[in-house]
Amino acid sequence: MSNRMEYIISPWEIESYIQYLKISELEDIGTKEWFEFHKKLILLNQQSVLEINALREESTKEWFVSFKKIPILIYEAIQIDIWKHKVFPLLIEINEEPKNTFMLYTVFYHEDIAVSLLENVLFHCESAETINDSALDLVDYAVKNVSLLLDMPNIEIYENVKDPNSCLEEILEKKKEFEFDIGIRCISILRYLAEYADNLPLYVLSRLLAIHDVPYLLVELIERHPWSKENAEGKDVIYNSGWRKVKSSEEGKISKIEAQTWLGLRELLLNPKSASYYEITEHRFSQLLKLQKYLHEYVLDQISPLIDLKRWLNYLSVSSANASAPQAVNVELLPQIKSSIMEKYHKKWKKLAKYQSKFIYSTDADYIKNTAQILSDAYDLEKLDCVDIKECFLCHEEAKKRCSKCKEAWYCGRECQVKDWVKHKNICDKITKNVDVQNFVSHIPLQHLLQEYLPQSPENK
């Protein structure tokens, strides 16, 4: 039985990658240099997930804090968001149907990776303290993407593809999937900004409350719960980096993302400094009181800090809607990242799209092969298995060991593996003898492309 690997990248690589991390240029998207940069973000994200899942020291977070590189992640996410709205439509207009999804997929994935890293490192207070003025840009970006969850249909990958042979249809569905994932991750980011508001400049709290009314937004999320739904079979499914069925043992449990939403609300509404920036108008009053019907005992038992929020809501319900603290003088600063990118490329979007077409729409087999080679290490099967949390095939508890023969069955320990062997043996033999293991790894992006363009070892030809 094989164990999970210790590192995705070595400790010295983690330090070096982060120390020399620099923002990318918008015009470089699709170039070899940009793919090298993208690969480093993927590996750092995988390493961060591994450290969190294994409950070990989070060295990735430590280096992002030490070198003050978190604003780069914010910049990258915002830059790709701008690219999606300004350059991508022009690429389609100029070139029409793409010949493959590889290049465009990678650009969309870049934003998701940057946000995933942000979500991981901002869990810690010291991380939030190093983002400086880019916190305003992060607030605007996060609010925008969370707001999209309220209007976005809960689709699964390729669920609505009209033509399964159309690369454009396929990439548009992937774009929606990434945007949904980003929106879900941004809920956690808003919760962390709310929690650490006292360690951030006051204008961050002001922007969360006075400009964007994040409490109102979070109440809407509680009402609509976009992270859960029924699938086509009528089964309850929950979103956690992908849709999965709710186990019988999980029924009634608060999901991680719903808990983040509740805790974000609590932090914003109960912070003593919030009263100066958040007047309880009649409209807000009626919105906030909707929360009372959701604060049942089973919710309070699972998230005990919400007891304070329930008391606050009870107090609010018997007080005047307009009773609020004196409003603070609000000196509003403006976010800089988005405006600086928009100003830099003003009236240059079409020129940029034409330039990027030769990379993103390239039909040069050598260029595509070299690009795939750059990313091949980031999509290594062992590494991807390492960062995914697996379930024991027998008892469904978290599994850290897997069958060394077929590499597909995971177990919490030797005892479960032995008990399951009678059932697993035939499947194991079939996988090992007749099927390439890679065909079973449907969650791996670019897998088919890597098979097509990367050199194969003699035994795999």
Image (spheres, helix red, strand yellow):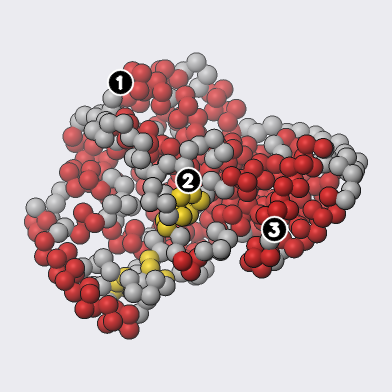
**Residue hosting label 3:** 295
Question: Which residue shows up at 23% across the image and 78% down it?
Answer: 421
- The answer to whether residue 184 is visible is yes
**Residue hosting label 1:** 95
In this view, the mark in front (2 or 1): 2
Q: Are marks 3 and 1 in contact (CB under 8 Å)?
A: no
Of 178 and 42, the residue lying toward us: 178
- Identified by mark 1, the residue type is Asn
**Mark nearer the N terminus (2 vs 3):** 2
Question: How far is mark 2 from mark 3, CA to CA?
Answer: 26 Å
Question: Which residue shows up at 34% across the image and 40% down it?
Answer: 158
**Residue hosting label 2:** 181
Q: Are marks 2 and 1 in contact (CB under 8 Å)?
A: no
Label 1: few (<14), some or many (≥20) within 10 Å?
Answer: few
Q: Secondary structure under badge 1?
A: helix
Is 460 above or below relative to 39?
Answer: below
Q: As drawn, is 191 to the left or to the right of 372?
A: right
Residue lying farthest front?
Answer: 234
Task: Place residue 112 in its image quadrant.
Answer: top left
Question: How far is mark 2 from mark 1, CA to CA?
Answer: 28 Å
**Mark nearer the N terminus (3 vs 1):** 1
* Residue 1 in picture, x, y percent from top left: 27, 77
* Residue 84 in picture, x, y percent from top left: 45, 30
Is 51 above or below relative to 115?
Answer: below
- Identified by mark 3, the residue type is Leu
Of 249 and 215, the residue lying toward us: 249
Of 281 and 293, the residue lying toward us: 293
Is 13 above or below relative to 211?
Answer: below
Question: How far is mark 3 from mark 1, CA to CA?
Answer: 52 Å
